[in-house]
Amino acid sequence: MGRRALKIVLTTTLIATSLVVGASNQAGDNATMAPQPFLEDMQRESAKKLERFGQILRAYAADHDEMFLDTLDRDEIKKLAPYVKPEDAKGLPMTNFLPANMKHFAPGNRGKDLPQTAVVAYDRSLLELTDGTNVLFADWRVEFVKSDRLEALGIKLRQKVKLARGTNSYSVNLPEQWKPYVSAGKLTVIGSSFYGVRSKSFAAYPHVRIRWSLRNLTSDPVELRVQYKSQRTTGGGRTGASMWYRLAPNEHRLIDDIIPMMTATSPVRLNVMAEELRHAGRKVDFPRHQLVTTDPFLPVKLPSNKFVARDEKTDHLLVKHARLYYSKGRGNVLELEVINPTDKELSLVLYAAATGDTAHSDKVGGDSPETGLFFETTKTTKPNSESVVRLPYSVPVTGQDPLLVFTLFGPAREVFAADGDLTREKITPLYWGWFNLNQATKQGLVSLPGYQPVEDRKKLTAQKQSEHFLFRYRPGSYAEQNIDTAIKEREAAYENLSSVLKMELPKTVTIDLYSDMEAKGLGSGTYYTPANTVTNTHIAEVYNQSYQCDAYHELAHIFSYNFPQTGGSVREGLIESFAQYFEPDNFQIGPAIAKVRQKLSDGNLRPLHDIILNDSNGEDEFVLIDFLLKKDLARFKRFHVSIMRAEGVEDLEMACQEIYQTGLKGLEKQWHDSLGAACKKS
């Protein structure tokens, strides 16, 4: 907050309306996206969060001569940690939420010198949806202030967010480099969002359904990669899914898919980005071009009713019913009865995800080791017949309000993407919905595991010290039963990293081993990943029978955080690639070098600055890190720190000149020459 910050713009996490989507044959039903009950709930939740933030800030200031924080970056916000209670993590995760959603002004005053009517913070996202917002004043009270009074308080009014309703279409602007190869029709977003399952990575997330057409204008195969990325209207936080589309010569394709949205608790926009195009197997360009930005959507909140479903009637498949049942022999089963009215066999794919607690609607979804259990089955239906698709599933022991979300795709087409990886294009989402498993259990349709409150599961009261680590875990847990194995793996990882990086860590590293994702989220404040660094000497992980985190990744982060002059990172740069580089099961450096060498030979290797600044993770980044590490370790450490702080190409150029005594082009040439030398040796 400058040096002694005064005013903070706060975007609170909102509570979304419960858009209960009843069984329907129309995917484009209109829905009111922000009814009055939703706005009232949002206003109350906003006031609670703003008041709690004021309490934390006030406690900190009281111990620091009424001074606020210097800035609101991640490192500075960690100073608030002693004043944050564990339960705050659910609604106000300090190191993730605040930097992404706060802006501030710095008049340079102490808190005690401010008039009681001075504004300390206000909720920006609430202001975009209602006629006013909650304001935190210097006397630490929170008050809802109407828009006509806000400008007098120094708060600039923003244009209200207009939420999309029903079905909306948007023009697609292709990059100029793509226009000789493909054309595109309008992108249509069908109906309101819903909870669905697109893949293991996007399970039980809110989704929207999209349709658009692509035409191959050439007589050769064309493959293009498009990224669907959603982001809050106020900025901060996003998620995305990249899709390959392979078009046969002169093919005209209707794309029909569902796209994950990043949150269930505040309005989001869907951004569609052009990433890559290959014509006849040769890469055309790297446009990084935005094709479409939609109107804001308000994703659904997880429902409390027993069963909700959407049915897209088509000419090639009908769904008669979806039901749950339980038997001792089969366990829990999801069953769909489908009708194939065509003269062809049709291949179907059924995805389902069981989540443990719908109260944390932003945190459900993802891979089974993280936040839920993911299931998949395929079924070939015979012509003109009825078929039953059965999918056994289990439920994690992570919550009181479990839910089963499912999506049926069909028919599915399998293609090989340009990089050789098999990609299944789920071209028709036919049927999707969710079951409240508590209600199903009362009817004898589901058997649920025993539930233990997360407040108990997050308590790590047992511990064991090793040479470089302090392990904390729950008595009787899987971690306790296997703690000697965990110690052996982590100490081996430490010795390898220390040997490669030629350094020792200055302090003992604490590793918290939680039994499940919800407990880890509440205990560490970070819900979206099964492992993360809490500080530069503290790691939090999920560790249970089905999932144990890689021993190297987070520890590599800890080592990098102790490089000379580390701190105040602006961007990730190669930070994730650096950690993944050391994962033993991640990739083989020899084949990776061969792939990158081939890209260089074909003229398809990205420029050095693009590889560094795009925060992607692949063989380009790994091979670059391998080169820089082996070229000069001390200089690599300095360069790694500079990359974390770099805001653009100019910063990288200065770092190259200072550290390697050459510019980006010079360093790039040295890398390319090493790839060529490796080619000659082989």
Image (tube, helix red, strand yellow):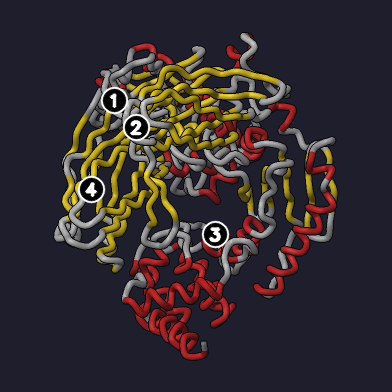
SS state under label 1: strand
Q: Which of labels 4 and 2 is toward the front?
A: 2
Residue 527, horizontal then vertical, whole percent: 57, 38
Residue matched to label 4: 291
* Residue 60 x/y as whole percent: 59, 37
**Among the two numbered marks 4 and 2 on one chain, the one whose residue lies closer to the N terminus:** 2
Question: Can residue 112 be seen in the rendering of this structure?
Answer: no
Q: Residue furthest top?
A: 443
* Classed neighbour count for the residue bearing mark 2: other residues with Cα under 10 Å, few (<14), some (14–19), many (≥20): many
* Residue plotted at (66% across, 38% down): 520
* Residue type, mark 3 in image: Gly
User: What residue is disc 1 on?
Assistant: 191
The type of residue carrying mark 2 is Val
Query: Label 4 sits on what residue type?
Result: Leu
Dots 1, 2 in contact, CB < 8 A: yes
Which residue is at 60% across, 29% downward?
Answer: 392
* Residue 322 in picture, x, y percent from top left: 48, 19
**Residue at 31 percent of width and 36 percent of height:** 269
- Distance, label 4 to label 2, CA atoms, is 17 Å
Q: Can you tell which mark lies on residue 567?
A: 3
In the image, residue 587 sits, relative to residue 310, either above or below, namely below
Relative to 94, is 327 above or below? above
Q: CA distance from mark 1 to mark 3?
A: 45 Å
Q: Quadrant of the N terminus?
A: top left
Q: Which residue is mark 2?
A: 208
Q: Earlier in the sequence, mark 3 or mark 4?
A: 4
Q: Amino acid at mark 1?
A: Gly
- The earlier-in-sequence mark between 2 and 3 is 2
